[in-house]
Image (cartoon, grey):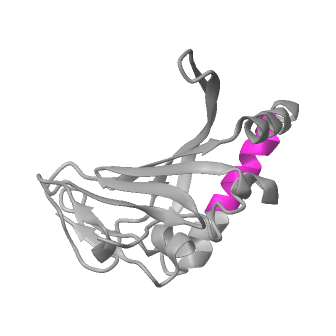
């Protein structure tokens, strides 16, 4: 199915604060894993080596400021996208990963961001949550794509999307501990 979930038009087009960084994205993977009423958000973006080294240099100069800037950009986008959610986040982490394979003769460079997201359970209980996803999807997809653009896994415990946004391949995966149902922007089990 065609559709797109979470990309950078607003949120992470500027995620790591810079216009060059967008042009040098090679691939983007986002996953959200539910546990109780908490969502564990993870985003891993592959960059060309030059951009990766520039960003790592900026990070190395002031690690705390760099991460605070990333948190501010994502948090503002999540909060602005749908004001009626009471989204909050904590336990932020950032990783710079450079993998080298002898066969390819070049490194694969990634910047990964992770956090816990609270407040997306808008009407359910801890045992049977009812998650809203507009806060996550609309900053990236606008109103063009919703959860009907995603595919279920065989066991119906996840939804995934594969596509391109601004010429960058993106994969978005939403994982749950039980089989789920959904409508345009809501997921429940």
Question: Percent from the top left, x then y, of residue 98?
Answer: 63, 26
Q: Name the foreground residue: 19 vs 15.
A: 19
- Whether residue 33 is visible, yes or no, is yes
Task: Judge from the rendering whether residue 97 lies leftward or rightward of residue 154; answer left or right.
Answer: right
Seen at 65% across and 51% down, the residue is 25
- Whether residue 97 is visible, yes or no, is no
Task: Judge from the rendering whether residue 174 lies leftward or rightward of residue 50; answer left or right.
Answer: left
| Circle count | 0
Seen at 46% across and 70% down, the residue is 137
Task: Assign the magenta stretch its main secondary structure.
Answer: helix
Question: Percent from the top left, x then y, of residue 126?
Answer: 25, 57
Q: Which residues are magenta?
A: 63-74
Residue 83 higher or lower than 71, as above or below: below
Quadrant where the N terminus sits is bottom left
Residue 67 part of the magenta segment: yes
Quadrant where the C terminus sits is bottom left
Residue 77 sits in quarter:
bottom right
Seen at 31% across and 80% down, the residue is 184
Task: Judge from the rendering whether residue 188 lies leftward or rightward of residue 165; answer left or right.
Answer: left
Residue 164 higher or lower than 143, as above or below: above
Question: Percent from the top left, x then y, of residue 118?
Answer: 45, 57
Residue 115 part of the magenta segment: no
């Amino acid at each position: 199915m065609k559709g797109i979930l979470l990309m950078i038009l607003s949120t992470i087009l500027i995620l790591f604060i810079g216009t060059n960084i967008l042009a040098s994205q090679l691939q983007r993977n986002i996953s959200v894993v539910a546990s109780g009423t908490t969502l564990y958000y993870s985003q891993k973006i592959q960059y060309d080596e030059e951009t990766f080294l520039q960003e790592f240099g900026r990070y190395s100069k002031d690690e705390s400021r760099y991460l605070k800037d990333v948190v501010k950009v994502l948090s503002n986008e999540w909060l602005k996208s749908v004001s009626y959610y009471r989204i909050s986040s904590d336990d932020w982490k950032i990783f710079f990963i450079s993998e080298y394979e002898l066969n390819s003769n070049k490194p694969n460079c990634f910047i990964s961001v992770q956090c816990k997201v609270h407040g997306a359970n808008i009407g359910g209980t801890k045992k049977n949550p009812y998650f809203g996803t507009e806060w996550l999807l609309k900053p990236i997809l606008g109103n063009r794509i919703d959860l009907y653009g995603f595919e279920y896994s065989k066991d119906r415990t996840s939804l995934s999307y594969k596509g391109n946004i601004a010429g960058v391949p993106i994969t978005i995966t939403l994982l749950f501990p039980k089989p789920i149902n959904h409508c345009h922007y809501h997921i429940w089990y």
